[in-house]
Amino acid sequence: MTSKWVVVLFGATGYVGGSVLNRLLQDPATKTWEIITPVRSPEKAKLLEKLGVKTEIASLSDHDKLELLASRARVVINAAGSDDLPAINAILKGMRKAHERTGELPILIHTSGTGEISEMAYGKYTAETVWSDLDVGQLKSVEPTAFHRGVDLAVVHADEGGYARTHIIMPGVIYGIATGPVFEAGIAKAISKDVPGLIKASLDRKRAGVVGPGKSVWGHVHIDDVADMYLVLLDAIKSNPQSVGHGWEGFYFGVTGHNTWYEASKAIGEALVGLGFTDDAEPTTLTDEELEKYWGSITAGGYAGITCVCRAERARTIGWKPKYTKGALLASLKPEAEMQWKLVQEKGGFDFSYEKSHAPMLDRIFKRR
Ligand SMILES: NC(=O)c1ccc[n+]([C@@H]2O[C@H](COP(=O)([O-])OP(=O)(O)OC[C@H]3O[C@@H](n4cnc5c(N)ncnc54)[C@H](OP(=O)(O)O)[C@@H]3O)[C@@H](O)[C@H]2O)c1
């Protein structure tokens, strides 16, 4: 009997990681994996164990623990942080130990994002460059100081170092309310990041907001299609490893369509009309004061006016078949606005602490043009 593959999944209490865990638990191959989910919350660990996974209490700052966990893993999936270099270095150190002990090449599936190849356009224009994840020369040309880049370079260098097989999933804006046991159990939040901030700001100002004129085009992907990508990758790695690009050939964009930020804001405006906040669905430009109020800084708020155009081709070569279209994105904004409004009422007010927490990092990386 062959032994089970130990899969260590960081970020199982999150939107992406929780969706990946649901897929892992539903996959026909689930019995061939021993799933370990390191999390910060002991309460959530107990809930996760009820779903049949092992847990460890660990923060990304517990570097010794990260190293130990990674040293025992056949596969590490990181959906907990795209920008924590010390954490990824600890994980890679553990993977090097695993390689030295077993002679195998441990697998890393790391989560980054297309923010890495985006331009801070403040809604004013659409990027002219079209990125392809099959164009390695183009991927190598990204500035080392770009968003997420330091961590991604560390990941690729591990592959070049010959002790790990690395894969980097780069989703665009992920949308849609996540479903499945992890979310039903209250372990993870079912909503994403960037679009919810725009929805909350619009609800608070009772009118859809948009950064600048909203002309910038950005790539999107539904949460279910993103989660599928991790499983397609994992299945291909297991069944036909030679078919699977890794290292510099291991960047996998997760984008299924593009929209302007205006289109998204207009759909939010229609949701606001439905909720009775306004009778005009037309978005209005967010002022600098509003960007600071909701996102903590003009640059952080400007992220909802960023631009990037890309073709997600590599994952399709190994069988990724995304199901959702742009219509699904626009249709998702009404139920999401209704859900956000319900949450605001339950909590007794708006909470922008999550949006604001990213301001120092975004300020450092994107300077206002
Ligand atoms: N959502 C998007 O649209 C999007 C798009 C592109 C890329 N991404 C990338 O995908 C990754 C996951 O995003 P998400 O939307 O799933 O975020 P999320 O819902 O906020 O989940 C983040 C996860 O990481 C964990 N985490 C964060 N800091 C940690 C720490 N110091 N120690 C231990 N665990 C920690 C959280 O644990 P707790 O529950 O304990 O907080 C949670 O499980 C991020 O790296 C993000 O950059 C997301």
Image: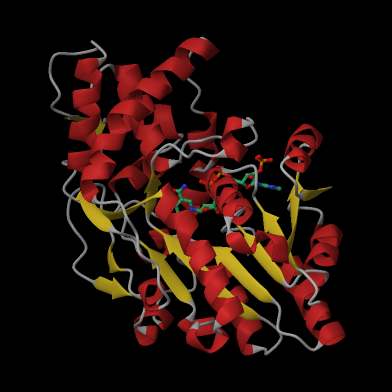
Q: By what rule are the colours in the image chosen?
A: secondary structure
Between residues 339 and 182, which one lies in front from this camera angle? 182
Asked whether, in this view, residue 230 is left or right of residue 221, the answer is right
Q: Identify the residue at image location x=51%, y=35%.
A: 190
Between residues 274 and 201, which one lies in front from this camera angle? 274
| Residue 243 % position (x, y) | 48, 86
Task: Relative to 195, say whether 120 is above or below.
Answer: below
Task: Relative to 232, say whether 314 is above or below.
Answer: below
Q: Identify the residue at image location x=68%, y=81%.
A: 164
Q: Identify the residue at image location x=78%, y=83%.
A: 99
Q: Determine if residue 18 is in view.
A: yes
Asked whether, in this view, residue 115 is left or right of residue 214, the answer is right
Q: Residue furthest front?
A: 1
Between residues 60 and 141, which one lies in front from this camera angle? 60
Q: Identify the residue at image location x=21%, y=44%.
A: 327
Q: Determine if residue 208 is in view.
A: no
Check the picture and name the quadrant holding the C terminus: bottom left
Task: Relative to 33, say whether 162 is above or below.
Answer: below
| Residue 32 % position (x, y) | 71, 66
Asked whether, in this view, residue 300 is left or right of residue 259, the answer is right
Q: Count of labels shown? A: 0
> Toward which corner of the image does residue 202 lie, by quadrant?
top left
| Residue 38 % position (x, y) | 76, 51
Check the picture and name the quadrant holding the N terminus: bottom right
Asked whether, in this view, residue 102 is left or right of residue 39, the answer is right
| Residue 359 % position (x, y) | 49, 42
